[in-house]
Amino acid sequence: MQTEKDQLPRGRSLENDFGRLMNDEKFHDITLNCSDGMIHGCKVILAARSDVFNSSIFNESTKINNNLSFNDISSTAMKVILEFLYTSKVENLNVDNIVEVYYASVHFDLIDLQDHIIKFTKSLINGNVDVGRKLLSEYVENFSLRAEDNEMSRILINWVAKNKLEKSEIDSLSLEGLKYLLDKTFDTQIPFATPEFNIWEYTLVKVIRKLIQNKTLVEKILNEKSLSICDTKEIENVKNLLTPLIGYINLNRMDVEEIKQHVEPFNIHTIDKFKDVYRSKAMNEELGFIRGVPIFKWRNNKVDKQLITSDDEYTVKAVWKIEFASVLEDLVTLTHHKIILGDLIFKGEGIYEWDLLIRKLCGNIYIGICDINEDLTKTTSDQRYHGWVLGSDGYVYYKNEWKWYNAKFKEGDKVTVHLDMKNKTCAFSVNNIKKPIVSEWKKIPSHVYPIASLGVGSELRIEPHVNKN
């Protein structure tokens, strides 16, 4: 069936005229053998538009038989390559072919096409966590674990890294994709959302689910924290899949109880490995609980309908909604500050920093940390904050104590929290001007949440704190 473009007279559009040539057998003089079939093209156009095709077409063997073989490129990807070479446009990209088309564009060194694919990839993964995991898995399948980094790998690694891996979710990240992620982020300082212990749990569950289809048995293994209820073959298979992955999971980022209760019982690591880890901890060589630069999202449990988080859950705003008030008491409650926590518990002995961008400021905003056991239901007109916080008025607060900190912030400013969990201290920066440690804060606990308290009408966004020095 002819399209509207096909019906245009020749000579009106170079793009349309060359598009016709792509599908017209009269102009086919070379066969491209792909991994799953063959397609045909025009030597002159391919050679004129691609240095790689030009070199291949005009070597002696191709001149004789007019055949080229591309055993690692599918016919689907090759058709998109030809579409671009003939028309300089691409209309057939989608989530199912974008990685293999990118692979082909790298093979043929088509820089403009790569740029187009990168933009399209960003639009695909934006707002869809699992699409990024699917594409990363396909990337590893098309390239290799040891392939040189490129723009596509960086985008996918960064996207998957900043979205927490949850053991309770069944997602599209393959074991090879997971291994690639853990390898590339082991020592790098990119935003990362998953604590090391949770990486272990996620990896363990993914391997077990892959090998054991009985859901009841899977749950029993996880609850009992042991593979002893499996048969010998199942245990061997689990260990075979886990062993190549555990080298990319750093036990020094876990605390002793996590290792003893949740890692040791599965007998995947060697005894010597555990001895080395415990020795390091005894010598105070413990690392932070999370790799990279910590990034978290807001924990919006939807109970307080005045708190609205963005689709990516990095932005939160407190809104005025009079329809929620049924009596005068409710109306007063609507004016109270709205409390929200981050979804990451900070612990261990590392130094952690994060930024908060003040999008809108109504009344006061309070930013800081709180005990994980803090009772947040006690927020009233008199108690507008919880934990150890900096207020937008420039004071720091803890319970009924406050002092002038000379760190006012306003709409459009950036506030940085500097948390030292080893020394149990906290400081703040406003627009990169760092203030001293709050010396009065002596009782910061070993496990804390990030916290924010917003006046109605206020809005802020979490950002990873990337040190540019």
Image (tube, rainbow, N blue to C red):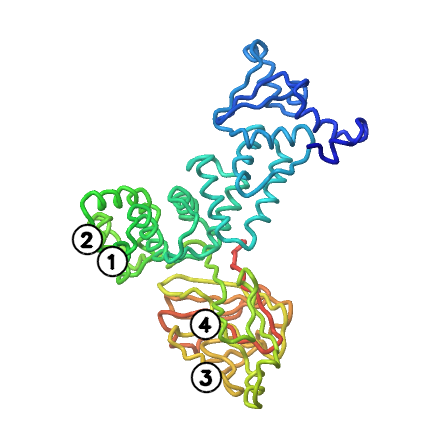
**Are the two marked residues, 3 and 4, in contact with CB atoms closer than 8 angstroms?**
no
Contact? badges 2 and 3 (CB < 8 Å): no
Q: Is residue 76 left or right of residue 371?
A: right
Per the rendering, the mark at residue 15 is: none
Q: Local crowd at mark 1 within 10 Å, few (<14), some, or many (≥20)?
A: few
With respect to residue 290, does 115 lie above or below?
Answer: above
Q: Which residue is mark 3?
A: 378
Provide residue 234's location: percent of width, then percent of height. 23, 45
Kindly indicate whether the residue at mark 4 contacts the one at mark 1 (C-beta within 8 angstroms). Answer: no
Q: Are marks 1 and 2 in contact (CB under 8 Å)?
A: yes
Quadrant housing the N terminus: top right
Q: Sort mark 2 into few (<14), some (14-19) or many (20+) by Cα contacts within 10 Å.
A: few
Give the spatial CA distance, label 1 vs label 4: 36 Å
Give the x, y percent position of residue 304.
Answer: 51, 76
- CA distance for labels 1 and 3: 39 Å
Query: What residue is drawn where x is 35% and y is 70%?
Result: 446
Query: Hey, what amino acid is under mark 3?
Result: Lys
Above or below 88: residue 241: below
Q: Earlier in the sequence, mark 2 or mark 4?
A: 2
Res. 369 mark: 4
Q: Mark 1 or mark 2: which comes first in sequence?
A: 1
Q: Where is mark 1, residue-wise?
A: 220
Q: Residues within 10 Å of mark 4 (few under 14, many from 20)?
A: many
Measure how far apart labels 2 and 3 are at the Cα level.
46 Å
